[in-house]
Image: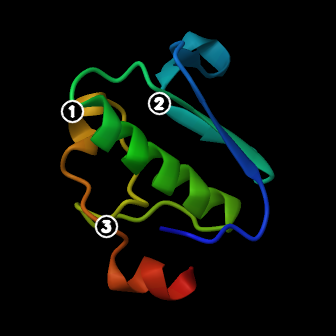
């Protein structure tokens, strides 16, 4: 999908929490990222979308407002299902 120039992405089975104990699906600091596989069925497709999203962050891509773009910020596993691919603008940046 993406040839990362830098960074590592770990997939863990545990739920992830950000500061303030808010649950998140993934997180990146720009040099490494982690995503949870605790996303409900269909797990494989949802985890693949999360990995692609975080890989975008590792390549310095920010969040996108387009509804189906993989760079869109989502809060729930169900919202992942609407993400399809990187939109043309985000794909061009990558």
From the image, tell me which residue sits under label 1. 78
> Is 89 above or below relative to 59?
below
Callout 2–callout 3 Cβ contact below 8 Å: no
Element class at badge 1: helix
Report the side of 72 relative to 61 (left or right).
Answer: left
Using a 10 Å C-alpha cutoff, classify the residue at mark 3 as few (fewer than 14 neighbours), some (14 to 19) or many (20 or more).
Answer: some
x 43%, y 60%: residue:
71
Report the side of 52 relative to 30 (left or right).
Answer: left
Q: Position of residue 70 (x, y in %)?
A: 37, 60
Distance from the alpha carbon under mark 1 to that under mark 3: 16 Å
From the image, tell me which residue sits under label 3. 85
x 22%, y 24%: residue:
41
Distance from the alpha carbon under mark 2 to that under mark 3: 18 Å
> Is 81 above or below relative to 75?
below
Distance from the alpha carbon under mark 2 to that under mark 1: 11 Å
Element class at badge 3: loop
Using a 10 Å C-alpha cutoff, classify the residue at mark 1 as few (fewer than 14 neighbours), some (14 to 19) or many (20 or more).
Answer: some
From the image, tell me which residue sits under label 2. 25
Picture quadrant of residue 55: bottom right
Picture quadrant of residue 20: top right
N-terminal of the pair, mark 1 or mark 3, is 1
Callout 2–callout 1 Cβ contact below 8 Å: no
x 28%, y 67%: residue:
66
How many numbered tags mark residues here? 3
In the image, which disc is placed on residue 10?
Answer: none
In the foreground, 42 or 19: 42
Q: Position of residue 16 (x, y in %)?
A: 56, 19
> Is 67 above or below relative to 26?
below
N-terminal of the pair, mark 2 or mark 1, is 2
Q: In the rendered view of the protein, which quadrant contains the C terminus?
A: bottom right
């Amino acid at each position: 999908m993406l040839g990362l120039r830098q960074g590592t992405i770990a997939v863990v089975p545990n739920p992830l929490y950000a500061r303030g104990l808010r649950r998140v699906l993934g997180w990146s600091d720009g040099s490494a990222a982690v995503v949870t596989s605790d996303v409900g069925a269909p797990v494989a497709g949802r985890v693949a979308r999360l990995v692609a999203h975080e890989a975008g962050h590792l390549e310095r891509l920010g969040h996108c407002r387009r509804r189906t773009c993989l760079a869109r910020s989502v809060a729930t596993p169900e919202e992942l299902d609407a993400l399809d691919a990187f939109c043309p603008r985000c794909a061009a940046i990558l």
